[in-house]
Image (cartoon, rainbow, N blue to C red):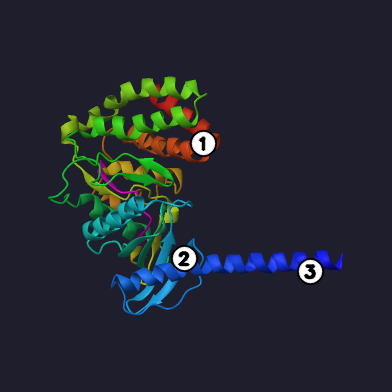
Amino acid sequence: GGFCETLRRRQRADSRLMVRAAALTAGEEVRRQLLEKGVCSKVEKSTAGGGNFMLDTDRGRAFVKCGTGGSSASKEILEYEAEALRRLGKAAGGALKVPEPWLVGELRPGSAFIVQEALDLGGGTNTNRLGEGLAALHAAAPPADWQQFGFPLEGCCGACPQKNNAEGKDMNWVDFWKECRLGDQLKMLRANQAWDNEMQDVGAKLLEKVPEFFEPLGPPESIKPSLLHGDLWSGNIASLRDGTPVIIDPASYYGHYEADHGINYMFGGGSAFRNSGYEARFPRAPGYEQRRTLYELHHHMNHYNIFGTGYRGGAIAMMKNLLR
């Protein structure tokens, strides 16, 4: 009995040591790369083992995120996130605070991290001020290097890959939405939920009807690209202590400004856009309710792809509602 207990204790101690050895890895590896690449000249030692953690540096506090959407991610995906943060910061022009990315690197192949400036969060979010900031973002003209719908890098939304027309094909918004959003979600569902024929049948009918939802706006070519956050649920909205609204964790692309409303209605009741700050610049356009449902549906399908059948019922109901 005594020997077995000693052995068990030793195994527990060994596993704690292994955990500690693993814990040294992420924090020390990120520190090594920040110093080696000249991003910072001083970085505190860290024993963080992964997930999210802070580092004190001579440039200020850094926030380190390993992976994205709660799982590990490739370097390409976090480079997409860093590029999205840079573009959002530029387009919002001070009306919103977006954390500045410092470095994207790998802990090991397929397991990447992103280092960004840490923000001093804590003020209450003033909805009208947030709305004004989002309106400024959506009103910003796309940069000279990207005038299409989509984004120069393929991306993801949460843990789900997202096609962004990175090759820069010239397509109108209706075609982009059919091919790269609704159509692509259906394709992934065919692989992930092969049994679900109803989703495919109803989805095919909805794909045919998509152009109708945009008819109240005039010809499809009249819809111009705005930079979108892409995943603007309430958990990705915060504010600095001085009240400046903050947006984090983007899944950005250039698209119809209303597309940003979808997930905010799914998780947040649409409050980021249902306020005088936003509506002063972007009043409700004809046919809005149906398009808002179409845009929210995309996120229900994305959640069905990531998390499984708990999101199926909501998605099917929305599709049938749109087909009425």
Q: On residue 26, which mark appears?
A: 2
Identify the secondary structure beneath mark 2.
helix
Helix, strand or loop at disc 3?
Answer: helix
Screen quadrant of the N terminus: bottom right
The residue positioned 29% from the left and 54% from the top of the image is: 84
Q: Residue at x 31, y 41 (%)?
A: 259
Mark 2 residue type: Ala
Q: Quadrant of the C terminus?
A: top left
As drawn, 109 above or below 178 = below
Which of the two marks, 1 or 3, is nearer to us in this view?
3
For residue 83, above or below residue 260:
below
Asked whether, in this view, residue 131 is left or right of residue 68, the answer is left
Mark 2 against mark 3, which lies toward the viewer? 3
Q: Is 221 inside the magenta-drawn segment?
A: no
In the image, taking residue 6 as reference, residue 123 lies left or right, namely left
Q: Residue furthest front?
A: 3
Badge 2 or badge 3: first in the primary sequence: 3
- Helix, strand or loop at mark 1: helix
Mark 1 lies on residue: 311
| Left or right: 304 as drawn, with respect to 97 | right
